[in-house]
């Protein structure tokens, strides 16, 4: 059994109230961010519409906002997230993001939200 020395709070392991409050904060940050990705995809040539241009946008052209969103997923600000260093005993922020992305709680919640969005468009 793996025992974690430090326990990072994330949206995957927080209380339902914390989840709701933090999700609203994250949603507000992601809206403009997602719009940037949509514009990137729309303006790209067909051959450039790949994951590499999106990764470049996320990890290069928009790194500060990326860190803010990652931090919000882990109940911290972007600078704190950006400075996590597992070699110094800090939790691994990248591993925390992977755990969030694979969390049945998060997957089911956001899948349901997308389904509700489609339903409301049909009304």
Image: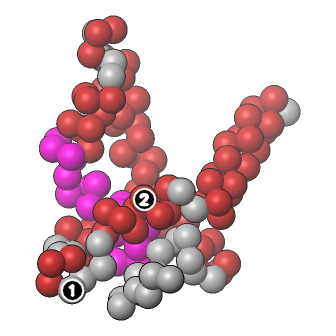
Which SS class for mark 2? helix
Residue positioned 20% across, 52% down in the render: 63
**Quadrant of the drawing holding the C terminus:** top right
Which SS class for mark 1? loop
Given residues 115 and 108, the one toward you in this image is 108
The 10 Å Cα crowd at callout 1, few under 14, some 14 to 19, many 20 or more, is few
Q: Main secondary structure of the magenta part?
A: helix
Q: x and y percent of residue 42 in the render?
A: 37, 18
Q: Which mark is residue 21?
A: none
Residue 113 in view here: no
The outermost residue toward the right is 123
Is 65 included in the stretch rendered in magenta?
A: yes
In the image: residue 34, left or right of residue 56: right
Q: Is residue 118 above or below residue 60?
A: above
Given residues 31 and 66, the one toward you in this image is 66
Which span is picked out in magenta? Answer: 59-77
Q: Quadrant of residue 68?
A: bottom left
How far is disc 2 from disc 1 in space, using C-alphas?
19 Å
Q: x and y percent of residue 30 in the render?
A: 43, 51
Q: Of callouts 2 and 1, which one flags the residue occurring earlier in the amino acid sequence?
A: 1
Q: Which residue is mark 2?
A: 98
In the image: residue 99, left or right of residue 37: right
Residue positioned 36% across, 65% down in the render: 95
Q: Which residue is mark 1?
A: 89
Q: Is residue 67 above or below residue 90?
A: above
């Amino acid at each position: 059994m793996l025992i974690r020395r430090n326990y990072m709070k994330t949206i995957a392991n927080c209380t339902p109230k914390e989840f709701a409050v933090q999700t609203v904060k994250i949603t507000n940050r992601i809206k403009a961010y997602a719009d940037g990705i949509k514009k990137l995809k729309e303006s790209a040539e067909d051959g450039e519409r790949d994951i590499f241009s999106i990764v470049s946008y996320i990890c290069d052209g928009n790194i500060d906002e990326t860190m803010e969103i990652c931090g919000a997923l882990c109940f911290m600000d972007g600078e704190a997230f950006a400075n996590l260093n597992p070699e110094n005993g800090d939790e691994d922020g990248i591993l925390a993001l992977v755990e969030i992305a694979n969390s049945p709680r998060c997957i089911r919640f956001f899948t349901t939200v997308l389904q509700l969005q489609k339903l409301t468009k049909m009304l």
